[in-house]
Image: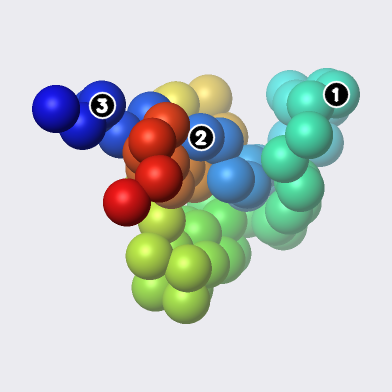
Amino acid sequence: MADAPTPIMFAIVTTDKNAVQGGMAPIFVAANEVERDRIAMWITRITNATAHDLHNGVVILTVNSSSSAP
């Protein structure tokens, strides 16, 4: 039986660079919420990631990774 996919944080898009610190994911800083949403949309389309709005000016993008090889 295969393990369930594990979401991995892929990228962070924010309007406030001070709201996010550290970590291994690249951080994209947008000038406003419209630009933040546009950047997140294009990254998710290009990479097949999923966007999660944290409602604090930060959107995290995740991809699912299976822990077992096919």
Could you give the CA–CA distance between mark 3 and mark 1, rounded to whole angstroms? 29 Å
Residue 12's place in the image compared with 46, above or below, is above
The picture quadrant where one finds residue 14 is top right
Q: Nearer the viewer, residue 48 or 53?
A: 48
Q: Say left or right for 27 vs 7.
A: right
**CB of mark 2 within 8 Å of CB of mark 1?**
no
Residue 47 place in picture, x, y as percent:
47, 68
Residue 49's place in the image compared with 8, above or below, is below
Q: Residue at x 38, y 36 (%)?
A: 68
Q: Residue at x 76, y 47 (%)?
A: 26
Q: Earlier in the sequence, mark 3 or mark 2?
A: 3
The circle drawn on residue 59 is none
Disc 3 residue type (three-letter): Asp
Q: Nearer the viewer, mark 3 or mark 2?
A: 3
The circle drawn on residue 8 is 2
Residue matched to label 1: 22
Disc 1 residue type (three-letter): Gly
The picture quadrant where one finds residue 12 is top right
